[in-house]
Image (cartoon, helix red, strand yellow):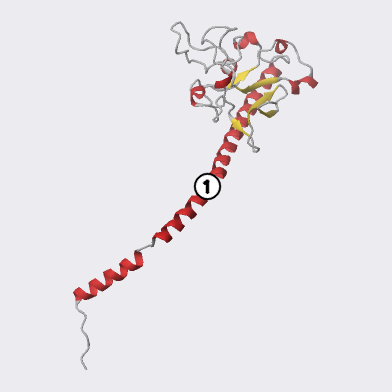
């Protein structure tokens, strides 16, 4: 009885056809895999975005705590007084020290603001990164500072201890453009129009808002409408 002989060429052809059958997917299989991947992306994307937003909120909170510590160190060294409007340039929002207002040829390098005041007093290093909230829009982060600060007259006095928790000290800016660099305020016409205002954070309930540091040192999240 003769045994069938498989030539090398036939063996290669059979192997190739076998591999093709093993590697091929049907259209239904591909559609099922695509749907599963899309569902996983849909489930994971909100969680990932929420985790990133939470991390940015935490960093902003830590920034404000650092600013609060410097504020109270100054207060302890300054006979119980907080930085006043005269010391910070009489306007509540300033760009980072050394920057210049780009649209005004007469602008000078910035020397005013709460950050500049703390740098001069050696309470915080320059360009520390503490003054930039990562959730603020890029155009504001480019100023090197995203936090507004109080210029209330009561800072020139010694506020009652039981009232410190009621007064804002520093907060995420969303209402004004920075004052003209190198010049004292007050300035008029620097308000951001209502329709352009951006609240930087989103709470776990999905409400937009901002962080606020109070004179007693605690940081509180303020939702839109509070």
The residue drawn where x is 63% and y is 8% is: 86
Indicate the secondary structure of the residue bearing disc 1: helix
* Residue 159 as seen in the image, left or right of residue 19: right
Crowding near pointer 1: few (<14 within 10 Å), some, many (20+)? Answer: few
> Residue at 35% of width from left, 64% of height from top?
23
For the residue pair 87 and 136, the one nearer the viewer reads as: 136
Residues 182 and 72: in front is 182
Q: Residue furthest toward the bottom? A: 1
- Residue 225: percent from left, percent from top: 68, 26
Which residue is nearer to you in this view: 178 or 121? 178
**Quarter of the figure that contains the N terminus:** bottom left
The residue indicated by pointer 1 is: 42
Whether 10 is drawn above or below 149: the answer is below
Q: Residue at x 57, y 36 (%)?
A: 53
Q: Residue 107: image x %, image y %?
A: 47, 8
Q: Position of residue 81 (x, y in %)?
A: 71, 14
Picture mark count: 1
Q: Residue furthest front?
A: 28
Q: Is residue 192 left or right of residue 79?
A: left
Q: Residue 50 is drawn in which quadrant?
A: top right
Tell me which corner region of the image, top left, top right, bottom left or bottom right, holds residue 201: top right
Which of the image's four quarters has the C terminus?
top right
**Could you tell me which residue is drawn at 60 percent across and 28 percent down?**
63
Along the horizontal axis of the image, is 90 left or right of 2?
A: right
**Res 103 → quadrant:** top left
> Percent x, y for residue 48?
54, 43
């Amino acid at each position: 009885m003769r045994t069938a002989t498989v030539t090398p060429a036939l063996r290669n052809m059979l192997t190739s056809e076998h591999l093709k059958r093993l590697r091929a997917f049907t259209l239904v299989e591909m559609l099922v895999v695509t749907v599963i991947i899309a569902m996983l992306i849909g489930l994971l994307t909100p969680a990932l975005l929420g985790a990133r937003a939470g991390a940015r909120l935490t960093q902003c909170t830590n920034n404000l705590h650092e600013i609060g510590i410097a504020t109270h160190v100054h207060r302890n060294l300054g006979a119980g007084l907080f930085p006043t409007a005269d010391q910070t340039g009489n306007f509540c929002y300033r760009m980072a020290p050394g920057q210049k207002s780009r649209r005004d040829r007469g602008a000078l390098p910035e020397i005013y603001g709460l950050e500049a005041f703390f740098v001069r007093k050696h309470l915080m290093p320059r360009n520390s990164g503490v003054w930039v909230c990562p959730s603020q829009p890029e155009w504001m982060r480019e100023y090197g500072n995203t936090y507004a600060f109080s210029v209330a007259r009561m800072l020139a006095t010694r506020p009652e201890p039981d009232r410190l928790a009621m007064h804002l000290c520093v907060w995420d800016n969303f209402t004004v453009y920075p004052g003209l660099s190198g010049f004292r305020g007050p300035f008029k016409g620097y308000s951001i129009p209502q329709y352009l205002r951006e609240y930087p954070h989103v709470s776990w309930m999905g409400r937009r808002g901002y962080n606020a540091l109070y004179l007693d040192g605690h940081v509180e999240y303020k939702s839109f409408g509070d």
